[in-house]
Each structure stands twice: as C-alpha cells, then as structure tokens.
Amino acid sequence: MKNNLIKFFPEEKNILAFTTTREKGDFRHNISAVYNLLKDLGFSGVKVAMPELVHSDNVFEAKKNNFSPNNLIKATDSILAREKDIFLAITFADCFPIFIFNKDKKEIGIIHGGWRSVSAKIIEKTIKKFPRKDRKNIKIVIGPGINFEHYEFDLEVAQKNFSAYPKRIIKSEKINKGYLDLKGIIKDKLQKAGITEKNIFDCGINTFTDKRFFSARKDKFSSNNVKACAAVIGVVE
C-alpha cells in the first residue's frame, strides 16, 4: 500500500485496515494526525474513535453521537463500531493491535493488546460483545508487536498474571527472568472466546527487529516519551 502503510484483510473489499510505519511520524495521542491521514486516503467526513490507552479492561462501543470526534476516549483500550462512517484507531510500540471484522454485519473492532490489558481479560470482554452465534464469522488480524524472544519479563509477574498459560512463559538463564509469548496468549484467548483458528491471522511482524516500526524496548523510550505508530480500521462502501 502507498504512503508507508501496511494493509490487512486484502481479500475484503469493504474494509480498510492498516498500520502506519515510523516514516509517517508519531501518532501517540495525536488524533488530528489520523484525520489528516484518512483525508489523504480519500476519507473525509468520517469520525475517528481513538482511546487514550491506559492498559485497562475497558471496552467502548463507538456510536455517532456518544463520543467527541476530536478528543481521545478516556480510560479505554478496546473499541467497537457497528455504524457507518466511524473509523477506529489505536497506537502501538510493541503492544499488539488486534483488528476485528465481522463481514456479515460490517462490525469492526480494535484492541490494544498490552500485557496488562490482556491479563485483565480485555480480549474475552471484547469478544463477549458479539453474540456467540456470530463469532464463527469474525476475522481477526494480530498486527505488529514484540516477539517473545525479545520480550524479557519478570518471571514472578508472568506466572502470577498468566498462570493458565505456562507454555507461553519461557524461563531464561537469568535469575527470576523469563520470556513472555504474549502473542501466543492472545491467540489462545481468542480461540477460547469462540473465534475459530482459521479466522485468526498473524501478520508476523516483530516490532523489535523491524526497523519500520517504533519499539518501546528497542528504542528505550521513557514512559513519558513513547513514540508510536497507528493502527486504523474502518468499513468502506
């Protein structure tokens, strides 16, 4: 795709889903940059729902009249939309953007898949918003994020928060350290929530090694100075 964007769901004509790369700049807390990007792509007159991201378990359903299109949605890490002309956006710099699309009903969603929100069951709470009978029609793309071999983690914290996924915690040679396979846990949780394995697509991009993307760990950002790419999804006619 042009303009340094990585596009997903290429087989679907009615969906636009993509991430930016670092060449497009820093999108953290920058909703106006998302509007400008969509305008450049030919989508003016749409509303953008974009959360501030606080590593929570909160899920927000965006409707035309329940959010301010020029402000970040507070205390939210997952957004859904079932109405036309609403695009959803989050930012990421190692955490996984998780794109959701129900083709039959033209429903969309996007989850900020950081370890805290995943541990707090944001995936389960998001998928629960869809009737169980519809979940077989939902397609998922797990976007760019950090691979386990670069995600060194406190072993005690990992075992406490992900005790149900012992195979996704790999011990390292360092005392009290391990590696967390967060993407593997995300896949496990999606399937357990009712998404079929064949409808879960892994883009395979590792933000730590792929120089096109910001990486909080590789770039050693401080918590107050994180730069991030954007992940965006919307229904198009």
Image (cartoon, rainbow, N blue to C red):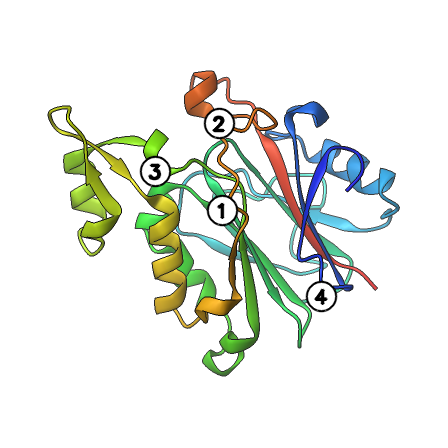
Find disc 2 in the rendering and name its residue: 209
Quarter of the image that includes the N terminus:
top right
Spatial separation of the CA atoms under disc 4 and disc 2: 37 Å
Q: Are marks 4 and 1 in contact (CB under 8 Å)?
A: no
Quadrant in which residue 174 is drawn: top left
Which disc, if any, is residue 76?
1
Q: Position of residue 48 (x, y in %)?
A: 71, 47
Q: Residues within 10 Å of mark 4 (few under 14, many from 20)?
A: some
Q: Quadrant of the C terminus?
A: bottom right
Q: Earlier in the sequence, mark 4 or mark 3?
A: 4
Foreground tag (4 vs 3)? 3
Disc 2 element: loop
| Residue 81 placement, left or right of 188 | right
Query: In the rendered image, which residue does mark 3 sit on?
Result: 148
Between disc 4 and disc 1, whose residue precedes? Answer: 1
Q: Which residue is mark 4?
A: 83
Name the residue type under label 2: Thr
Residue 5, percent from left and from top: 72, 38
Type of amino acid at the residue the image marks with label 3: Phe
